[in-house]
Amino acid sequence: MKRVVKVLMSLLVALPCLARDPLTLSNARELAAADAATPEGQAYLKGFFTNPWRLALNDANEHCRDAQLRSGSHEEFVIALSIGIAGFPIESLTSPDDEGMKCLARRLMSTEFIKPPYDGFAIYMPFKNTEPGTERRATTSSPGGSSNQ
């Protein structure tokens, strides 16, 4: 019994050390760049930015269409995700932080993606709207493997 109490006390002391700082767009960009720089991260991003990602984003856009219309269109926006070990986002941030973008973030939180190399894998995706026919081919070489730049 004393051993169990000691273990529990040790955990209570260690928990604050194990807690992460809340995800912000700034630290998401830094984490995503570091994650994308690893061989495991590069392999994961190649798998992430495939048809399932596009389907998930299209589904989220469809589901959030009314909220996005109320919020207005954005020339540029950012989506940042932290993917948990099971493949579901554990955190999702957007900028701007309006009703339409919040809806998109909530919808992406319920999407199962491929499992990352480790818990909390960060992906930072800046988007820029372009006129149809003028967009460049997307690359995954920028931090976070952004598409649609």
Image (cartoon, grey):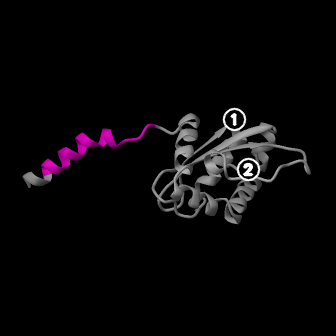
Q: Which of marks 2 and 1 is nearer the N terminus?
A: 2
Q: In which quarter of the image is the C terminus?
A: top right
Q: Is residue 39 above or below residue 81?
A: below
Q: In this view, does 9 lie to the left or right of 77?
A: left
Residue in view at x 23 percent, y 46 percent: 11
Residue in view at x 13 percent, y 49 percent: 5
In reply to whether residue 27 is colored magenta, the answer given is no
Residue 64 drawn at (x, y percent): 73, 50
Amino acid type, label 1: Pro
Residue 71 drawn at (x, y percent): 77, 37
Q: What element carries label 1?
A: loop
Q: Give the range drawn in magenta.
A: 5-21
Q: What element carries label 2?
A: loop
In reply to whether residue 6 is colored magenta, the answer given is yes
Q: Is residue 124 left or right of residue 117?
A: right
- Which residue is identified by label 1? 96
Question: Residue 111 got which mark?
Answer: none
Residue 141 drawn at (x, y percent): 66, 50
- Which residue is identified by label 2? 64
Please, what is the dominant secondary structure of the magenta stretch? helix
Amino acid type, label 2: Cys
Residue 48 drawn at (x, y percent): 62, 60
Q: Nearer the viewer, residue 112 or 47?
A: 47
2 or 1: mark nearer the eye: 1
Q: How far is disc 2 from disc 1 in space, using C-alphas?
A: 15 Å
Q: Is residue 49 above or below residue 76?
A: below
Q: Quadrant of the N terminus?
A: bottom left
Q: How crowded is mark 2: few (under 14 residues within 10 Å), some or many (20 or more)?
A: many
